[in-house]
Amino acid sequence: MSLSSLVIDINAMLDKAESPSTDDCCIYKVPYVIRRHNKDAYTPTVVSIGPFHHGHPQLQNMESQKLIYFKDFLQRTKACLNDLVCYIESILSDFKRCYSETLPFSHDELVKLILIDSAFIIQLFWRDYYEGRLFKPLLDTGITDDLMLLENQLPFFVIEKIYSLSLTNDPNTMIQYSFLRLTIHYFGYYNKSKLDFDKGDISIRHFTDLIRIFHLQHPIESRPSRDMFDEQKISLPGATELLEAGVRFKVNTKSKCLLDLRFSGGVLEIPQLTVDDRTEISFRNMVALEQCHYPDDSYITDYVAVMDYLINTGTDADILVRNEILHNMLADSDSVANLFNGLWKNVTQSNISSHFSILCKDLNAFCKNPWHKLKATLRRDYCKTPWQTAASIAGILLLFLTLLQSVCSVLQVVQQAS
């Protein structure tokens, strides 16, 4: 290759190099250092949504189903296809900036991808709301799981606008609910506090973002502050060690927000969490989102870190299960321990919320007090049941009376001798 040809070739390569906008980018390829621990947790198995996994051979079976849903969507709404295409063309630049990597699609390919995938989601959510889910349970669960994955997303604003445009010619427009409402209903399993966002006080970037909001349960401004410049790593004994040190565990029934861990009077209160086959998928993708997009607001990562410290073994998990903090739907307690031990691997955390930082410091200080451990030992060995407590008290009284009798006998002997 001649020098001039080489220069031309390098310039062509540079022309293709585009830095994603950090302000607009919200859909990421999961970093390899995290992905390698469980690739399946980040990869769709049933349906591809968006550009990152489009065209994957194992997902081709759903492409025909997406076209059927697209056709049903157009017939139901009487939407103008020309208007929809024009809208998508008008926001293509904004759409591309939402992704962390350059998209290898032509203009026409990208327009079709956005339109078909958006229509499929709208029709899926609409049917779920008004007719109930129509897929077989296994397929239905697989689709829901795939729609939570960080790499398998469309920007929420795009789908929402297409939904809005589709209502223009719909005779039932006045009784149609917002796309946000349909979305919240579809992912209702994760909406434990029944949030509805009717006040319009929240911005959703995509479905992974929504799942994270459900787990946090309240707006960003009311969440704990973060120690932005505190690089100190937290540490915490496991549940077994805490129990031996006198800490008692109690489920926090007053709050469903994962962040609401409280420690007072030797009692650690933790909101209940159901651990099932979906838990690892949802948590891994929420943590990946925070790693890429919310490094200064990584509240889910904070929670994962604390739980990773608390649950080192199946015995630790059993303690939380017995106290109804964890509702275990996995095979056994060891599976729960393995799940939480794997979630925090290779995760970068430069700061932690002040709430969790104080919590860990208070727990560590409590465990270092030998009096608390002594009380716990006495409670464990001599006061497990009311009968054992009564027997222990009786034994102490008997010992005291015996000692008193011995003292009296000694005093009597001394008096007689004098």
Image (cartoon, rainbow, N blue to C red):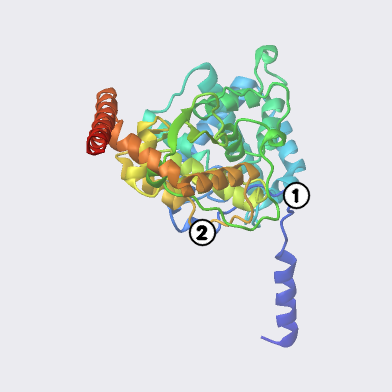
Q: Is residue 193 above or below residue 143?
A: above
The reply to whether the C-beta atoms of the residues labelled 1 and 2 are less than 8 Å apart is no
Q: Which mark is residue 23?
A: 1
Q: Disc 1 versus disc 2: distance between alpha carbons?
A: 25 Å
In the picture, residue 194 is in which quadrant?
top right
Residue 350, image x, y percentages:
63, 56
**Kind of residue at badge 2:** Asn
Residue 44: x percent and y percent?
47, 45
Q: Nearer the viewer, residue 227 or 56?
A: 227
**Element type at marker 1?**
loop
Along the viewing direction, whichever of 27 and 305 lies nearer the viewer? 305
Q: Earlier in the sequence, mark 1 or mark 2?
A: 1
Query: Is residue 286 visible from the viewing direction of this image?
Result: no
Horizontal side of residue 186 vs 333, given as left or right: right
- Can you name the residue that lies furthest to the bottom here? 2
Residue 294, percent from left and from top: 66, 48
Residue 91 is labelled as none
- Depth check: 407 or 12 in front? 407
Left or right: 12, with 334 as reference point: right
* Amino acid tagged 1: Asp
Residue 113: % across, % down: 60, 43
Q: 10 Å neighbourhood of mark 2: few (<14), some, or many (≥20)?
A: few
Residue that appears at 56% across and 29% down: 71
Which quadrant holds the C terminus? top left
Can you identify the residue that label 2 sits on?
Answer: 346
Vertical position of residue 241 compared to residue 70: above or below:
below
